[in-house]
Image (spheres, helix red, strand yellow):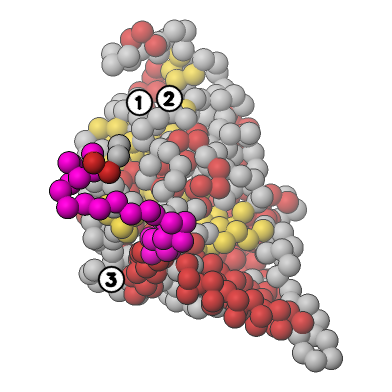
Amino acid sequence: MNATDDKTICPGYTPSPFSRRDMLRSSALGFGSLALSSMLADSFANASGSVTHHRARAKNVIFCFMDGGVSHVDSFDPKLELDRRDNQLFTDSRNPTAMGNRRWLKSPWTFRRRGQSGLPISDLFPHIASCADDLAVIRSMKADLPLHSTGVLFLHTGLNNAGRPSLGSWVNYGLGSENRNLPGFVVLSFGVVPCGGMENYSSGFLPANHQATLFHAEGAPIDNLRPPLPNGRGSAQTSMLDLLRGQDADFARSTGMESTIRNYELAYRMQSLVPDVLDLARESQATQRLYGIDSSIASKRLYGIQCLRARRLVESGVRFVEITCPPGASNGTWDQHGDLKRGHEKNALDTDQAIAGLIKDLKSRGLLDETLILWAGEFGRTPHSAGRDGRDHHPEGFSIWMAGGGVKGGTVYGATDDFGMHAVEPVVTMHDLHATILHLLGLDHERLTYRFGGRDFRLTDVHGNVVHDILA
């Protein structure tokens, strides 16, 4: 197109050369706009801390993640019809072409009514059973897909695909941390990357200071946590950080990357506080026994340590703590397609006493009312099997439970059908679960939003209803 063409299209237009310097100047203004957008979003994230939409029932969350999928019909959802039909050919009117040679499989564990509430819990969890009156069991959970990677991401982020902020990140973004010297979102990890990857703990498009901080199960909770010894003129690390702080401040003014600086400063402050917070030598022998830390079984002892650390972290102001399971099956600790009885019993032995100890310890300290405990995996397991000692992935209906933090203990909400195959009314989705958790923390899931890419995002997307019937 020549100048004549330009004038024809836009009368009065006079073309002028666009120099490289002009291009850079215009681009710089564009980058400035991007930086301003980042700064405003960051400022809003900081301003949102500790501001609730309604009266909060809980201040903190401890999430006991049961990766791989615990069998609901062997734990919190007894099915007499499975006892009657055991080893008979599996039939399902909703999907008759997928029956094959599978057979119904009854539970190898006995269910008993526990506590004053009479809540049915199997012998698989004898210690958690002693806390029956504190549990609100949801039996009608439903997920989307029978795949570990998507299921774990859905549980953590509300989406089957990577890229969204984790539940813990949303909570930290919405409420902020109660302790500026500790992260608001901590994952107590055994060093195993979960299905779905580290995206489960990511802050996604939220500012980076809302992502999870991973603590090790053994030894120093974080690598290089101990500060170096000071030299004759003071700490070399302090001098280095002073220099970096000045450089980062200049960088932040030009790019809006304050979140990165806050992460570095938090890491420095953690050096003095984290070792004391996680020093279990300060706990009595009776407390350590309560969590099973005296066990000769290494995996049970380490899980007990993690649960006790979780109590100490929320006690010190950490907003959201996730506890992962000791390593088990390759796709998740509870993923027993075969060897169900031995696998589930081993996993229960590792986790049962420590979780019950956590509930009892929080209760004795007056902290259970303000701490919400979530016990959940990405799905359940099939009531039928291709063999006689294993179950497969089952998102169509399964159980989770919550305790403390404003839930009504000793209750059951929802149900599956007579065989445990399908969740029936009222069905509870992952978005409903997330909406309920946020509600207990004083956050309206429809109002907790973050603007990204031109639209407002929220943990529950355009879905989710609070399950009011389990609230105290």
Give the quarter of the figure containing the N terminus.
top left
Look at the picture and state if 393 lies above or below 345.
above
Q: Magenta span covers which residues?
A: 5-31
Percent coordinates x, y for residue 100 in the rendering: 44, 7
Look at the picture and state if 146 lies above or below 464.
above
Look at the picture and state if 24 lies above or below 329.
below
Amino acid type, residue under disc 2 in the picture: Pro
**Would you name the residue on which mark 3 appears?**
52
Residue occupying the point 55% across, 16% down: 387
Residue occupying the point 21% across, 52% down: 13
Local crowd size for mark 3, using a 10 Å CA cut-off: few (<14), some (14–19), many (≥20): some
Q: CA distance from mark 3 to mark 1?
A: 39 Å
Closer to the N terminus: mark 3 or mark 1?
Answer: 3
**Would you name the residue on which mark 2 appears?**
383
Residue occupying the point 24% across, 68% down: 53
Local crowd size for mark 2, using a 10 Å CA cut-off: few (<14), some (14–19), many (≥20): many
Give the quarter of the figure containing the C terminus.
bottom left
